[in-house]
Image: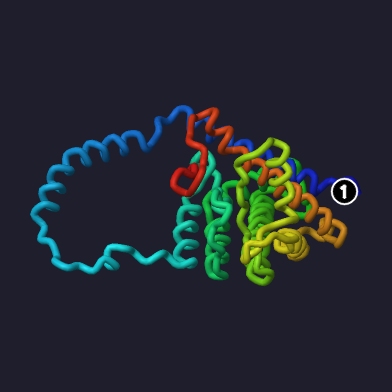
Amino acid sequence: MIEHKYRALRSCVRRMAAVMIFISGGMLWAQAAPPADSKTAATARVQGADSEPIQRRKSEQAPRVPNAPASAAVPAPPSTSDQAEQQLRQQERQRILSVIPNFNTSYIQNAAPLSPRQKFRLAFRGGIDPFEFVAAGAIAGWGQAENDNAGYGQGAQGYAKRYGAAYADSADGILWGNAIFPVLFHEDPRYFRQGAGSFSSRFRHAVLTTVWTKNDNGTFGPNYSNVLGNIVAGGISNSYYPSGDRGVGLTFEGDATVTAEGALGAIGVEFWPDISHKLFHTPLPNSFQDAPK
């Protein structure tokens, strides 16, 4: 059937179109709204200037402790777990155009490895983000308009089934590809942005991350988590898709489509800071301190 053959392709087009709709809206909002940090930064500078003499007087009046050991002034270096926690907290604030979550991107090539608990936490944070629910609604609406997965029917009931399927597809992929399999295979579920080099090398880096990833020990190897996660998520979808839209062939066809979508997403994440720098004069990320939010 033609519908079966091209269902995965239409699904890919729908998802990419939904993302482009939100990107376009975010661009308009970002261009119209003044930078939120400018007023805050100005207030902080004024407060800092006013409080500086007071802080200086307090420091001059503070009693000094005689014969304080020199080692007390040197803080202990943070542990690997503490470094990972600090970096993870910053990642959880990263967004593209303040709308699209970018939690799974690291701007530090030698970032501390995540613990199993942190991997599940990162996956959960992405799975419950409001953008995921809005995107699922857009995909379901488009599918209803095209009468995709006709077995779901039309009306409110058909839309609800399409909405649940769209969100389940995303949630299953996140759970298996970003949490369960990365823990089992000791792989890092994040995308490590290259950020430097020629366009071709960065493009190649982004595309290859769908099948080649960083391990917890710092080495690189096959991305079992992403490939197997897409297959498992596709297999689970056979339990809730209409009977006419199930099967082994469609599962692997959908896996190839989702892998291609992941490559497109990686390309976008790799080059978005450069685009944002040109359009909105945002600083290019060199570390978590200046990573775009």
Q: Nearer the viewer, residue 78 or 12?
A: 78
User: Residue at position x 56%, y 56% from top?
Assistant: 110
Drawn side of residue 203 relative to residue 73, left or right: right
Q: Is there any visible trace of residue 230 in the rendered image?
A: no
Residue at x 23%, y 69% (from the top left corner): 69
Q: Position of residue 201 (x, y in %)?
A: 71, 41
Helix, strand or loop for disc 1: helix
In the rendered image, which quarter is residue 255 located in? bottom right
Quarter of the figure with residue 64: bottom left
Residue plotted at (58% across, 32% down) = 275
Circle 1: residue type: Lys
**Crowding at mark 1 (Cα within 10 Å: few <14, some 14-19, many 20+):** few
* Residue 99 on image: x %, y %: 52, 43
As drawn, the residue found furthest toward the right would be: 1
Residue under label 1: 5
| 28 on left or right of 56 | right
> Relative to the observer, which residue lies in front, 5 or 242?
5
Q: Quadrant of residue 116?
A: bottom right
Q: Is residue 203 above or below residue 240?
A: above
Task: Name the one closer to the observer, 252 or 201.
Answer: 201
Q: Residue furthest bottom?
A: 184
Disc tally is 1
Rendering coords of residue 49 (x, y %): 20, 38
Front-most of 3 and 276? 276
Q: Is residue 264 visible?
A: yes
Which colour scheme appears in the figure?
rainbow
Could you tell me residue 56's position as x and y percent?
A: 14, 47
Vertical arrangement, residue 150 with respect to residue 145, above or below = below
At horizontal 74% and vertical 63% (from top left) the residue drawn is 224
